[in-house]
Amino acid sequence: MTAHNRILEKTTSANEGAFTPQDWALFWGVALIWGASFLLIAISLESLHPGVITLGRVAFGAVALAFLPTARKRIEPGDRRRLLVLSLVWVAIPFTLFPIAEQYINSAVTGLLNGAMPIFAALVAALFLREFPRGAQLVGLFTGFTGVVLISVPSIGEGSNAALGVFLVLGATVCYGFAVNIAAPLQRRYGSVTVMSKMLILASIWTLPYGAWGLTDSTFELGPVLATLVLGVVGTGAAFAIMASLVGRVGSTRASFITYLIPFVSLALGVVFLGDEVEALAIFGVVLVVAGAVLASRRRR
């Protein structure tokens, strides 16, 4: 057995073993942090313009990751165009859409709709590979999209503004679906912290005009400012560093199950801390979304 194979076997064995207490701490830590991001956006909106929230989030996140040595790797010229696209579809566009959307729908519903990200990621992957989903994947896509409809219907029924909020969140989630597929080769080559650090720096440039414009429509109260700071430093910067550590410990497949917990975390936090109201139909919808995401994400034999 070659040295490379021994290392690969050792890494695979470690990734397939039982979670250690530290693995569980990292796993639940990321789930709670990302699930809380919708709550933090809602708090920030109490006195800050959506553009200021987005700019603060990406700028504080970029600063947080800049202190990590792994963030300083150089991106080769041939990969910079892909990185530029990612800075738009993974950060600048969705991070801008979420605060705008939460002006019209509550944080819990926003988090529930965001749970459809694996559904869109599976659909985009199928389009990239030009393979029509079959079997469990097809069932998963239909189940997931049914869940999205059930989550959306109560909010859309509240009027055009709520409907706009729903479509903005779905637009952001579709962006994530493209981003995770585009990002995979770069993350394997440079590591997720390096890629995210560079993306946040670029996204800070893209979101600067909208953020500067929003300064005149903001009042800088302590609570919303702190919420934006935490959203950037912890919810964006630190969370990606923790996720990268978790992937290294347990493997990307098992670490990705965090995605299925985020809607439930956002639901619980929104109801408990903000008194968000969510229809039973929407809660049933997110169960379908998660079930559909599990099926749609399965690899073909």
Image (tube, rainbow, N blue to C red):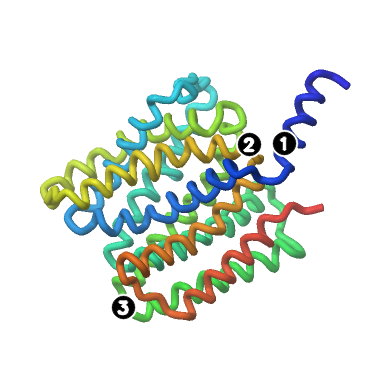
Callout 1 touching callout 2 (CB < 8 Å):
yes
Relative image position of residue 268 (x, y in whole percent): 43, 66
- Res. 102 image quadrant: bottom left
Quick one: label 1, few (<14), some, or many (20+) residues within 10 Å? some
Q: State the SS at label 2.
A: helix
Comparing 193 with 101, the one in front is 193
Q: Position of residue 298 (x, y in %)?
A: 71, 55
Name the kind of residue labelled 3 in the image: Gly
Q: Quadrant of residue 141?
A: bottom right
Q: Which residue is mark 2?
A: 249
Q: Between label 2 and label 3, give the one nearer the viewer.
A: 2
> Which comes before the other along the chain, label 1 or label 3?
1
- Considering the numbered disc 3 on the image, is that residue within a helix, a strand or a loop? loop
| Identity, as a three-letter code, of the amino acid under mark 2 | Arg
- SS class of the residue under badge 1? helix
Quadrant in the rendering for residue 248: top right
Q: How many marks?
A: 3
